[in-house]
Amino acid sequence: MPRRTATMLASTLVLIALLCAGVLIKVPYSEMSPGPTVNTLGDSGGEPVLQISGRKTYPTTGHLNMTTVRVTGADYRMNLVEAVYGWLAHDSVVVPHDTLYPDGKTDEQSNQENAEEFSQSQESAKVAALNELSIPVKSWVIVSSVVKGSPAEGKLHAGDAIKAVDGAPITKPADVASLVTKHKPGQNVVFTIIPAKEAEAAKKAGKEPEGGEKLTITTEKAQDGDRAIVGIQAGTDHAFPFTVDIKLADVGGPSAGLMFSLGIVDKLTPEDLTGGKFVAGTGTIDDTGKVGPIGGIEMKLIGARQAGARYFLTPRDNCAAAASDTPSGLTLVKVDTIHDARQSLDKIRTGDTAGLPSCSAK
């Protein structure tokens, strides 16, 4: 065999061996890439994303798009070839697997957590939108979850309304822990609660749960300290004066809260928020309308621009990362609250874009 042919054959075999090794070798990394972007003012799966009944709504134009990030699953392990390709690609990011899935979370656990966060973000988006429009919303404290094996298990249940602890009225979730920790481990604490089924019936009727029954629970010592606990997580539930449903499948996490809330505001006000402009954005939101940071901002910017967005509403704490690599043709708009976002949309609609709060890479 001629030397040149032998060398080429050997090189080809080495290359094949390297490629095979690259495919077989698993690495502890995951990939993030731009996910779907959906107009909260439009349809998804053949039905409106935002469905409001019992209250007058108004026509809308333009886009208020929520953005997403596509990630490899918790149970999936990238091979070396995929990781290298992801590192070289501009429209994806390769990160350590534990960054996305800490504590060894499985796909099932991660999906469940994302679904719960998405549900809570919808609730907060409704509250924030109605508060922004000065529409009253009834709120009360509930048992959000019960720790298995804790003193509360079997006595308190998720969805129970907490009216009082030791006779002191409860107005916010933090009140519960504050009153329980006044006790020493082993002492009794008295909860006044309304069972979840009754609380849910009141909510559907647009009313705050009334009444209550007393339950005595013996506290125990927390594993991470000397404080007394009963083993529950307190949260908030709401009764709305009309129905607001958010219909969007195959999306999880809390980052669409801001855009959902703005979509609701747009549908409930005569003035068109966008003036026909294409605006996208991201950000968590709480009941007060405060906007919080999210992950994967770089991928969301790429997805938004690819979809046609010209403006991107960006949480303040994501501004530096967003400004360091902004797609051409996309203007970043810094927001802290739903009210900030609404004022910025006024400027976008009227063309006063020179006055928009901008993001800095510093």
Image: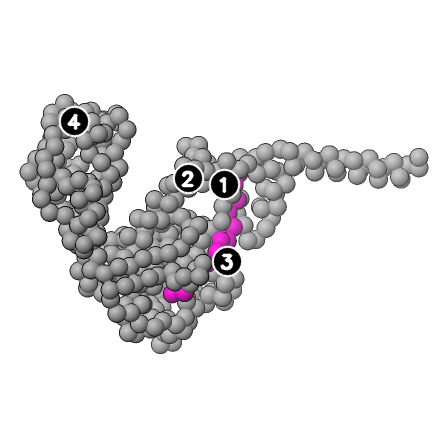
Q: How far apart are labels 1 and 3 at the CA level?
A: 21 Å
Q: Which residue is mark 3?
A: 302
User: Is 169 a magenta residue?
Assistant: no
Picture residue at 49% right of the left edge, 66% below the top = 308
**Real-space Cα separation, disc 4 to disc 3, in angstroms:** 51 Å
Q: Nearer the viewer, residue 325 or 216?
A: 216
Label 1 neighbour load within 10 Å: few <14, some 14-19, many 20+: some
Q: Nearer the viewer, residue 231 or 98?
A: 231
Give the CA distance from mark 2 to mark 1.
9 Å
**Would you call the spot at circle 3 few (<14 residues within 10 Å), some (14-19), or many (20 or more)?**
many
Q: Which residue is mark 4?
A: 219
Callout 2 touching callout 4 (CB < 8 Å)? no
Identify residue type, mark 4: Thr
N-terminal of the pair, mark 1 or mark 3, is 1
Residues rendered magenta in the picture: 29-42
The kind of residue on which mark 2 rests is Ser
Packing grade of label 4 (10 A; few <14, some 14-19, many >=20) is many
Tag 1–tag 3 contact (CB < 8 Å): no
Q: Horizontal and vertical percent for residue 167?
A: 6, 38
Dot 3 lies on which element? helix
Q: Earlier in the sequence, mark 2 or mark 1?
A: 1
Residue 290 x, y percent position in the rendering: 27, 55
- Mark 1 — residue? 73
Of the image marks 2 and 4, the number of the one nearer the N terminus: 2
Q: How many marks are shown on the rendered structure?
A: 4
Helix, strand or loop status at disc 2: helix
Quadrant location of residue 313? bottom left
| Residue toward you, 37 or 51 | 51
